[in-house]
Amino acid sequence: MYLVLYDTYCFAARKKVSITIKDIAALAGVSKTSVSFAFNSPERISAETYERIMTIAREQGYSPDPIARILSNKKTKNIGIVLPQSISVFFQNPYLGELLRGIGSVCDQEGFAVSVLSPFKGIVSQTILNAAVDGILIMGISKDSEVHTTFRQRNMPYVTIDAAEVGDFVNVGIRDAELAKQLMDILLKNGHRKICFCLLQSISSNLQKADTSGTREARLNGLLLSAKEYGLTEEEKKDFYFMNVPATLSDAYDKALSVLKKKDRPTAVFCMADVQAYGFYRAAQVLGLSIPDDLSIVSFDDLPFTETLAPGLTCVHQSAYKKGRIATKLLFKMIAGQECESAVLEANINHRSSVANIS
């Protein structure tokens, strides 16, 4: 797999005949800077200026490589992955690493490169406008995100991962709401009411306008349904504590310390990602707290590193690697013009030793 990381856009320009950026600028009546913006940062100029520059560039036979490929109706042999977090955070998130490993295994087989795109303002629209990729894998958006409309308008094949909700798009995920309910049932059945909930947190971006991901919403709905079915009163639910926790080891550890140092600390923690649970294991050890006697923990993912945790972590087992492979295969089918349907993967709860009965 050939991996390309983009924090900003920078395409290598290729000249045809003797046309230069200076020539395009003169013909369009704009500055060379505006021409550069048209190819690299189109959001920085008006739509009218962008279209004028692109029209002249096509007429004169000048364009960056991605445009040249689309004009000649050739495939780029490259797919894009839009992250729910910045690239710097991505490399600290083992779940995303497993997803990428699955994606890369299929791309290796098919001879495709992968461009990992950080979700800062404008970057996805630039990818689509410049046709730098044949298709997009996008993680953790809701069914109402404007991204769906944008991709369809551009006729860009795309597959979502962990959108969780049913919609008129192709998604690969698990039964998030149902599994979250089962995890919450475990805590409530064992007498826990003072529970801290670690929510998934992605960085703000124009992709989602800071809205919550489908996965986050589905898991929230599942655990709240469990509380409702157990007949918890509003007074009892006042002991629930919700907080956003970035899926990085350092951030999870810092958040865990702040919670566990409180006199009125929770008896249990519901984590939406294993990396958050790892932070609480580490913080509990530092503070001399015993798991599960002083603190019970449940989580999602069951990533390989959880095997090192003691006592064993009770969590939802899912294969991020398999999820990445299936999503990529579906995307390649869409690129080939085939119709595809969403895939709901099998997942189950691994019952281990991280929950104590305090009834």
Image (cartoon, grey):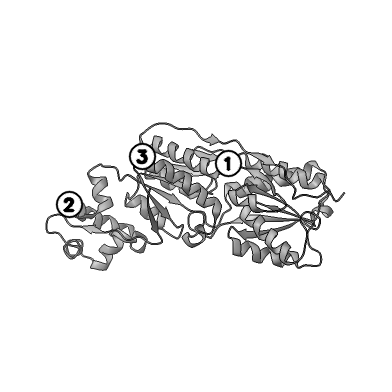
The tag earlier along the polypeptide, 3 or 2, is 2
Q: CA distance from mark 1 to mark 2?
A: 44 Å
The tag earlier along the polypeptide, 1 or 2, is 2
Which residue corresponds to the image point at 34% horizontal and 51% vertical from the top-left? 129
Could you say which is closer to the camera, residue 49 or residue 188?
A: 188
Residue 270 numbered mark, or none? none
Is residue 156 shown to the viewer in this render? no
Q: Dot 3 surroundings within 10 Å: few (below 14), some, or many (20 or more)?
A: few
Question: What amino acid is found at the position of numbered circle 2 in the picture?
Answer: Glu
Could you say which is closer to the camera, residue 178 or residue 36?
A: 178
Q: Which residue is mark 1?
A: 165
Check contact, mark 3 vs mark 2: CB within 8 A.
Answer: no
Residue 110 numbered mark, or none? 3
Which-is-in-front pick, marks 1 and 2?
Answer: 1
Which-is-in-front pick, marks 3 and 1?
Answer: 3
Q: Position of residue 195 (x, y in %)?
A: 76, 55
Q: CA distance from mark 3 to mark 2?
A: 34 Å
Q: Which residue is mark 2?
A: 59
Q: Position of residue 113 (x, y in %)?
A: 36, 48
Could you say which is closer to the camera, residue 314 or residue 6?
A: 314
Question: What amino acid is found at the position of numbered circle 3 in the picture?
Answer: Glu
Which residue corresponds to the image point at 44% horizontal and 60% vertical from the top-left? 121
Question: What amino acid is found at the position of numbered circle 1 in the picture?
Answer: Glu
Q: Dot 2 surroundings within 10 Å: few (below 14), some, or many (20 or more)?
A: few
**Residue 9 versus residue 300 in the image, above or below:** below
The tag earlier along the polypeptide, 3 or 1, is 3
Is label 2 in a helix, a strand or a loop?
helix
